[in-house]
Each structure stands twice: as C-alpha cells, then as structure tokens.
Image: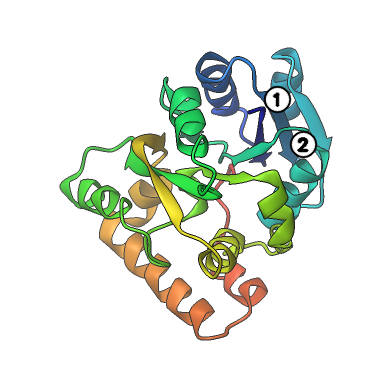
Amino acid sequence: MNISVIIPTLNESSRVAQTLIRVRLAMPEAEIIVADGGSEDDTVAIARQLGVHTVQAPRGRGRQLAAGASLARGQLLLFLHADTILPTNAARIVTDAFADEHTWVGTFRLQFDDDSRFLRFCSWLTRFDTVFTRFGDQAIVVRKDFYQQLGGFPHWPLFEDVELLRRARRLTRVVSFPAAVTTSARRFQRGGRIRQQVRNAWLLLRFLAGVPPQRLAAEYPAEPSA
C-alpha cells in the first residue's frame, strides 16, 4: 500500500529536518507533504532542500492537515506532528496492521523525549483507546477512502484529532500499533509536567462538554513552533 505522510508545520526550523530525515529512513517509499501555516523561519526552505513537497495553507492544524490530505496520492494517510519521530520500523508496522482488511484507522503509542516518571505513565496509557488517551501526536494512520468517508479533519485550531477519532470510533475500532513514536515534551517542560497535563485535561473536558474549539484555542497559546 502506498503511504502519504502529511506534516503540519509552523516555525519548526529547529526540528523539521530531524522529523523528515527519520520519515525518509523509516518509510523510503512514502510520499511526504509538509503543509505549512505561514512559517516565518526556514521551515519551508529546509523541507524543500530535503526534496519534500510543500503546500501553504491557512494557519491552524485542522486546515493544514486537510490541505495536505487533499493533495495526497497514497492509499494510507499518516498524519505526523512536526516534533514527532517515527520508529525506524514504521513502514513494516503500518503495512502489517493494514494488511488486515478490517483495519481502517490506527495510531502508534506515545513516548516523550523526557524520561520523567509522570510522562512515562502518561505514555503507558496511550495503548488504550479512549477519547482521553488517543491524540494526533501519536501519528494517526487512516485509509484514504475512510478518511474521506469521515469528512476529513474539521478546520479547527484545536481538537481536530479528537473529533476525527471520535467519528471513526462510531464505525470501527481504532487500532493501537505495537510501537511508539517519540514526541517533544517541550510544552510540559515549559509549563510544568503535571500542571500542563491538568490544563490539557480541563480543555478537553470543556470541549467534550460543547465549548467551541476556537474559543479553547485562545487559552492554548502556540509554542514558538507549532
């Protein structure tokens, strides 16, 4: 199966090369699309130097992911955050999972580039499929026709991943791949590990209670990089 990797970026010049190089190593046959939301640094230039197709999209992760997916040619779409690193055997893991015709969508498990006991516990929870434990930073992989059936990502600045997976669960099981991606703990390190997780949970609970994601996004300021 052909795989398209879609990466939303915003001022990720310090990290995007590492992410893209690992994608090339882990999935040498994959199509890679960087959907940039108006970076003011060298993010786009770095992606182009590495031979990656780039597209400009309105800022906001939901819009950027949707823009990248609209150009993708792969049968499988892998949505990867710019500060998240795939495991070296990602291609085999994804191919094996989707060899089962009943697999429509899945995510990797999560680990952080921070070895704190609290974040290790949070990572362990990501093997379970709940609205509180599966998010876009775990790299969502979905069959393209199923993604289209779900209506794609909503054009939201926040919780677009939660909404896509919530729609998917109404129709199928969200598979947990037997490997982890490694994502940056920078937001936890800056805001305090436990304090940041409490803040995240409070925002998610309010979203599930019906507060618009646009309103919540104003309370979740972006890092220097997206």
* Secondary structure category for the residue under label 1: strand
Asked if one can make out residue 148 in the rendered structure from this viewpoint, the answer is: yes
Q: Amino acid at mark 2?
A: Ala
Asked if one can make out residue 41 in the rendered structure from this viewpoint, the answer is: no
Q: Residue at x 64, y 17 (%)?
A: 29
* Secondary structure category for the residue under label 2: loop
Q: CA distance from mark 1 to mark 2?
A: 8 Å
- Percent across and percent down for residue 109 are 36, 44
Q: Amino acid at mark 1?
A: Glu
Residue placed furthest toward the front: 101
For label 1, the residue is: 31
- Percent across and percent down for residue 66 are 75, 51
Residue placed furthest toward the left: 117
Q: Earlier in the sequence, mark 1 or mark 2?
A: 1
Q: Quadrant of the N terminus?
A: top right
For label 2, the residue is: 72
Residue closer to the observer: 165 or 45: 165
Q: Residue at x 69, y 14 (%)?
A: 50
Q: Residue at x 74, y 39 (%)?
A: 35
Q: Mark 2: few, some, or many residues within 10 Å (few <14, many ≥20)?
A: some
- Percent across and percent down for residue 147 are 68, 53
Is residue 213 depicted above or below 126 in this figure?
Answer: below
Q: Quadrant of residue 179?
A: top left
For the residues labelled 1 and 2, say whether their Cβ atoms are less than 8 Å apart: yes
Left or right, 83 with reference to 148: left
